[in-house]
Amino acid sequence: METTTIETGRLYGLKRILGSATAYFLLILSILPILVGYAWLLIATFSYRTEGLFPIDAQGNIGGWTLRNWSFLTDPQIWRVTLNSLGIALGMVVGVGFVSSLAGYGLSRMNFPGRKAFLSLTLLLHAFPSVTLLIAIFFVLKFISKIPGLGPLFGYNTLGGVALVMVSLELPLGVWLMKGFFDNISWDVERAALIDGASRFRVWWEIILPQIKPGLAALAIFNFLSGWSAFLIPFTFTVGSKVANLPVYLRQLMSETAPTNWNQIAAVGLFQLIPVLIFFLFTQELLLNIYTGGAKGGV
């Protein structure tokens, strides 16, 4: 009897080990193409050229590491486009965060005619790909360009215009996420503050917002990464290098009439990727709040 129990325990342990080994094997197999891609990116940035994952020097031999692909760091334009990318990203963080938190609070706490229809329409707007709205957005930005005072800031071929479009496209998702976080907050403290004479704005600012800081942080990170890597909107609605961002600058390095230096493009791509990796390493737990707290709210 005791021997049978020991054999059963060993068999159970063996099954657990095999199950874990199979899961890890499938996981490694699924992410292997991504790891190979990042490995090539890292090798290519420090070599003259590559054949597969092997660096090749100027004479065609394996080896020959170099820093010449990073010479773009001495070009003032790279820092200009980096600041442009940073401006778009921060504009999205502030714009989407502020408007979404106000709208989400109102939709979560107030009943008014057309509330459910507005929520459904907001979700429907997010379903449309941004590429289907490019022509309409172009005419809107051209119209804003003719308005004195606003045109130079938020018109066509301006960073403000790009940020305005990006904020508008991300607002539907932001409003729904913020509404979900507000729905999870108890009414008790809020009712007490309203009874004591606090205004709605003061309740929102001093009582409710501090309770959803993880949600605000997650939304801010999500929008920063989205703005930092934006390509379609800046590429479509900006002309010239003064208002280009990093992805557009990367596209400009690809020539249709001359050989493309893919190793330099890999270096610029890695330069753009470094802030994203740092952000993700330190904020991945906050990003998970988008799929937990912000997903529980209903209509």
Image (cartoon, rainbow, N blue to C red):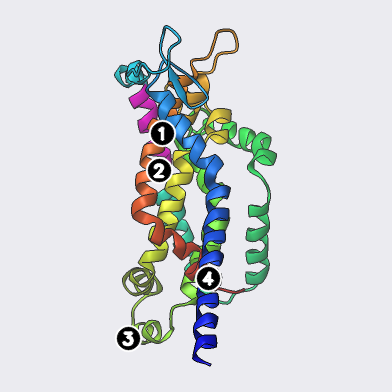
Q: Secondary structure at mark 2?
A: helix
Viewer-side label of 2, 3: 2
**What label does residue 272 carry, if any?**
1
Distance from disc 4 to disc 3, alpha carbons, whole Å, reads 65 Å
State the image quarter where residue 82 is shown.
top left
Residue named by callout 2: 276
| Residue 87 covered by magenta stretch | yes
Asked if the residue at tag 3 contacts the one at tag 2, i.e. Cβ–Cβ closer than 8 Å, the answer is: no
Above or below for 61 versus 28: above
Left/right placement of residue 26 relative to residue 222 reads: right
Residue at 67% across / 40% down in the picture? 133
Q: Nearer the viewer, mark 1 or mark 4?
A: 4
Q: Which residues are magenta?
A: 78-92
Location of mark 4 (residue): 14
Instruction: Residue type at mark 2: give it.
Output: Val
What is the spatial separation of the Cα atoms under label 4 and label 2, in whole angstroms?
A: 41 Å
